[in-house]
C-alpha cells in the first residue's frame, strides 16, 4: 500500500470514528434534529427504543428517547453515551463496517445509586455519500443488563 493510500485510509477511519462521537453528542444534548450529520437518508437503526428506518423516523425516535429519559425535565444531558474500542474495516473507497462499545449512563438517579444504564456493542455499516461518511445501518446489542425472559 502506498503512503497516500495509507494516509487516506487513516483519514477515512478517523472520519468514521467521528460519526459515532457526533451521534453521542447530538443525542445527549437533545439535538436529534441534526442526525443527518450522522446517518444516510435511508439508514436503519435498531436500539433500545426500537427499530427506525429512514432519517425522519430516526430523528423522531431519538427525540422521543431524549424526552423519555429526561425524567427531571432538566433539558440537559439526561444520559451520557460514552463510546470506546472502535474497530473499523474499510471494504472499498465508499463502504466500511465497524463496531464499538457503548457505556450508557443516566443522570437522573440519586447519587447513592450507580449511574449505569447499560453496556452495549454497536455494529455499524458506513457508506460515503457525496464525499462524506455516514452510518447506513446500526444495531445495538445490549450486553448488560441481561433481560430476564
Image (cartoon, helix red, strand yellow):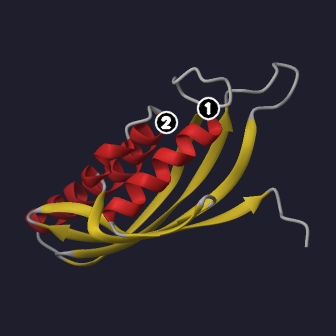
Q: Nearer the viewer, residue 128 or 35?
A: 35
Which numbered tag is attached to residue 113? none
Which residue in the protein does label 1 denote?
Answer: 70
Spatial separation of the CA atoms under disc 1 and disc 2 = 10 Å
Q: Nearer the viewer, residue 61 or 77?
A: 61
Which residue in the protein does label 2 denote?
Answer: 28
Answer whether residue 13 is visible to the viewer in this image: yes
Label 1 environment density (alpha carbons within 10 Å; few <14, some 14–19, many ≥20): some
Image location (x, y in percent) of residue 96: 31, 74
Vertical placement of 94 versus 18: above or below?
below
Image location (x, y in percent) of residue 104: 64, 44
Answer whether residue 124 is visible to the viewer in this image: no
Vertical placement of 95 versus 6: above or below?
below
Vertical placement of 46 versus 30: above or below?
below
State which quarter of the image contains the C terminus: bottom right
Residue 11, located in which quarter of the rendered image?
bottom left
Residue 110, located in which quarter of the rendered image?
top right
Task: Look at the numbered disc 2 and give the secondary structure of its residue.
Answer: helix
Image location (x, y in percent) of residue 60: 42, 53
Amino acid at each position: 500500500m502506498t503512503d497516500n493510500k495509507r494516509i487516506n485510509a487513516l483519514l477515512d477511519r478517523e472520519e468514521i470514528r467521528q460519526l459515532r462521537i457526533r451521534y453521542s453528542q447530538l443525542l445527549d444534548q437533545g439535538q436529534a434534529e441534526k442526525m443527518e450529520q450522522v446517518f444516510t437518508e435511508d439508514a436503519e437503526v435498531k436500539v433500545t427504543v426500537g427499530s427506525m428506518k429512514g432519517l425522519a423516523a430516526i430523528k423522531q425516535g431519538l427525540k422521543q428517547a431524549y424526552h423519555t429519559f429526561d425524567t427531571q425535565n432538566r433539558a440537559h444531558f439526561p444520559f451520557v453515551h460514552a463510546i470506546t474500542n472502535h474497530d473499523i474495516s474499510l471494504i472499498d473507497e465508499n463502504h466500511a463496517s465497524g463496531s464499538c462499545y457503548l457505556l450508557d449512563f443516566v443522570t437522573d438517579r440519586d447519587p447513592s445509586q450507580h449511574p449505569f444504564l447499560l453496556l452495549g456493542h454497536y455494529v455499524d455499516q458506513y457508506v460515503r455519500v457525496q464525499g462524506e461518511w455516514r452510518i447506513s445501518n446500526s444495531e445495538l446489542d445490549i450486553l448488560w443488563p441481561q433481560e430476564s425472559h
